[in-house]
Image (tube, rainbow, N blue to C red):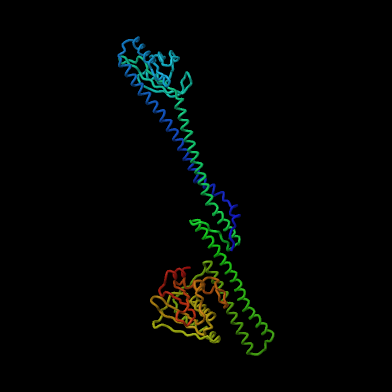
Amino acid sequence: MSVIPKSIRRTLRIRGLRQRWLVNAVLPVILLVMLAAAVFTIASARYYYNSMRAGLETRARIAADTFTGYGVKSYSEYYRLASYSVETFEEKDQLELQFINANGRVQVSSYGLTAGTSPGTADIASAIGGTMAYFQGRDPQTGENILSVSSPLFFNARVVGVLRYVTSLRAVEHQILLNFMVSAALALLVVVLTVLSNAIFINNVVEPVAVVSDAARRISGGSYGIRIENRYRDELGELVDNINDMSLKISQAEQIQQEFVSSVSHELRTPLTAINGWAETLEADPVGKPEQTRRGLAIIGKESRRLTTMVEELLDFTKIQDGRFTLRIDTVDLASELEDTIYTYRELFRQEGIEVSYTSGDEDIPPVAADGERMKQVFSNVLDNASKHGGAGKRIDVSAERAGGDAVIRVRDYGPGIPPEELPFVKQKFYKGSSKARGSGIGLAVCDEIVRLHGGTFDIANADDGAGGAVVTIRIPIAVTGETEKGKNN
């Protein structure tokens, strides 16, 4: 088994996975961070503007109420009071205080250059109409961004002028720009950290995925048995273990299949050689000795039956693999089918020095719903297996009894038994283990499938009485089961 070298792992890349990760994971974070920065900037700008406007409106309202409270009775008194208020105004560096007449012209101003001008903003028109208002935008005269608040001045319920505060928005805009730059810098830092952390994470994911992908590609190309070095203790580690296990099992299956082909080729060649040899012998000497002729014909018949059995097993196994294996369910006397099979094999076994004994239980086995031909195939295969692998014991015991709702058939030989480490695999397809006996290695797999379709169990174990040998136990439900119905309907 080979291990994927680190040089190959370093060159592996899965760009599509990185791209999907960046689009699905990183891009939403970037968009959210950008949105948060934009919302923060807009909210801070609105906060500054609203706070400044509210402050100016409060000052304008208080100043207008104070001005009106003096009880101005003439224009000269109004003008004198306005001029005094402008001259004593202490915030000339931050604000401009204006008094505007009913025609919209500036009468006096803390910033003298604006006196006599007509600002022409909407807040002045609203104040002349009797309503406090504000204006935010470019000054029509200077082009500078300003915020102004205008409050009407009343005398005898009549607007005699407008008190107006004006301030530049340059400092506020500078502060908003500063806030935006700070939020943008923080957003950029978050984006960079997000991209870096995700790049590290995705690299840690992509590398093993790329290694697994390369391993799967090599396995599909025929490099069975390769292993991936597992350096992970999480889901990636489980994935690597599963790939390694799959590679190992595919390698084992490939080896078993090669052994199966070799075994079948040998098994087919042996009877064909015997048949061809005796056919040529009889053909060359058609009037030979009767004893030799009978012996030759017997060998030809025996080897032909071996070939027929192997071909039938192969066909059945192919049907099992394709899902075309079916049963023809009928009412069957299972004990009678077993006895017929024993009768067929007893004489053949006697010629090999093997004695077959049969015992039945005290209670008769009633007829069961089964496929008689398939069950006879199972019995024949099990008896033949017992003679091949347990023939050294020169004895085979067969029993049939009713145990509760099941018909139980046991076939026991007195040979060397099955090595304990091979017991879990003896029913697997192509498996022959350490046995040197003839056979394709699929007969027991076919028997197991037939019994399973009948709703029963097919178990193989070593005898536990100390006398050696293996025991095959077949259980078939006497009542019709769901599996039987399934096999019947197929």
Left or right of residue 89: residue 348 = right
Front residue of this view, candidates 44 and 459: 44
Front residue of this view, candidates 14 and 232: 232
- Seen in the picture, residue 185 relative to 64 is either above or below; the reply is below
The answer to whether residue 426 shows anywhere in this view is no
Q: Position of residue 250 (x, y in %)?
A: 56, 64
The residue lying at 36 percent from left, 21 percent from top is 60
Q: Position of residue 214 (x, y in %)?
A: 58, 56
The quadrant of the rendering that contains the N terminus is bottom right
- Seen in the picture, residue 323 relative to 350 is either above or below; the reply is above
Report which quarter residue 168 is drawn in.
top left
Q: Residue furthest right?
A: 284
Report which quarter residue 409 is drawn in.
bottom left
Q: Position of residue 3 (x, y in %)?
A: 58, 60
* Count of numbered tags: 0
Left or right of residue 425: residue 222 = right
- Seen in the picture, residue 456 relative to 22 is either above or below; the reply is below
- Seen in the picture, residue 326 relative to 22 is either above or below; the reply is below
Front residue of this view, candidates 229 and 216: 229
The residue lying at 52 percent from left, 74 percent from top is 444
The answer to whether residue 362 shows anywhere in this view is yes
Q: Position of residue 480 (x, y in %)?
A: 41, 72
